[in-house]
Amino acid sequence: MKFFLDTGNLDEIKRIVRLGLVDGVTTNPSLIAKEGRQFQDVIKEITAIVPGPVSAEVVSLKGDEMIAEALEIAQWAPNVVIKLPMTEEGLYACSQLSKKGIRTNVTLIFSAAQGLMAAKAGATYISPFIGRLDDIGVDGMELISDLRTILDTYDLKSEIIAASIRHIGHVQQAALAGAHIATIPGSILPKLWAHPLTDKGIDQFLKDWESVPKAADSVK
Ligand code: E4P
């Protein structure tokens, strides 16, 4: 499974890139707004740090305007992916951009039918929002698993990005349900490697190490 970071924050991205764990980044207008900086500056800086795909979202609602925005954003870096809303106009923009060889990520997917439409329109990525489905009592994991079955059955090339992840259980469940990618907030990803028993074990090892006789030229 690939890991994307779901953030516009450079510090969060640099922290995880250092570990070699970032395969890509997703942003959205809300995440960009949190940074208080120009959209173009944020995206250009992220694309320079992360070699993988970096999703940048259009804000127009009309297909032709989405395409115009997309063509501008696509100039910013070769690894930019255009994020489009799951609407009729978004599907139009998706199919047109796909014909031009521009990669797309269709976002705000809440049903298998929507995912199928986006995949047929040529989306590179489809983003079901599992946390927001959980919020209204719908099983987001069932959606991931249904989407994977549909893509595999009809040999559709889109990859599923499990989005709107709220906790580490979501990442584990999305991996089991067949998501190709999980896009994880910078506040949640570090929780995937942390465990209190690991910290306790290190403390005990270091305490015991103090009683080990040391050679004069030993570094520790
Ligand atoms: C995905 O691409 C979105 O940016 C994101 O996962 C939305 O998550 P939220 O529901 O926590 O806002």
Image (cartoon, rainbow, N blue to C red):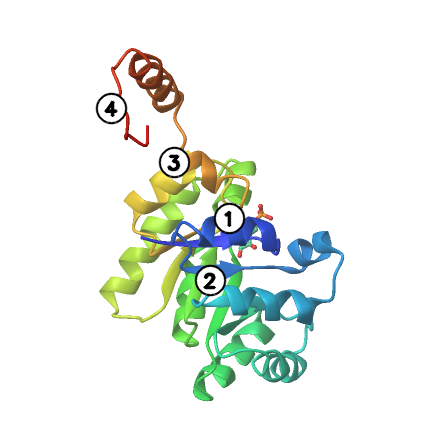
- Identify the mark nearer the N-term, 4 or 1: 1
The residue pinned by badge 4 equals 215
- State whether residue 15 is above or below residue 151: above
- Identify the mark nearer the N-term, 2 or 1: 1
Which amino acid type is marked by label 2? Gln
Q: Is residue 45 left or right of residue 37?
A: left
Q: Nearer the viewer, mark 4 or mark 3?
A: 4
- Identify the mark nearer the N-term, 4 or 3: 3
- State whether residue 42 is above or below residue 33: below
Labels 3 & 1 near each other (Cβ < 8 A): no
Depth check, front residue: 32 or 138: 32
Q: Nearer the viewer, mark 2 or mark 1?
A: 1
Q: Report how far apart the C-alphas of labels 2 and 1 lie in the structure.
A: 34 Å
The residue shown at (53%, 69%) is: 48
The residue shown at (43%, 85%) is: 101
- Identify the mark nearer the N-term, 2 or 3: 2
- Residue 30: image location, x then y, percent: 68, 54
Q: Is residue 57 left or right of residue 145?
A: right
Depth check, front residue: 93 or 13: 13
Q: Report how far apart the C-alphas of labels 2 and 4 lie in the structure.
A: 66 Å
Badge 2, how many Cα within 10 Å: few under 14, some, many 20+?
Answer: many
Badge 3, how many Cα within 10 Å: few under 14, some, many 20+?
Answer: few
The residue shown at (27%, 57%) is: 149
Question: Farthest residue in the right direction?
Answer: 36
The residue pinned by badge 1 equals 15
Which amino acid type is marked by label 1? Arg
Q: Nearer the viewer, mark 2 or mark 4?
A: 4
Q: Is residue 59 left or right of residue 100?
A: right
The residue pinned by badge 3 equals 193
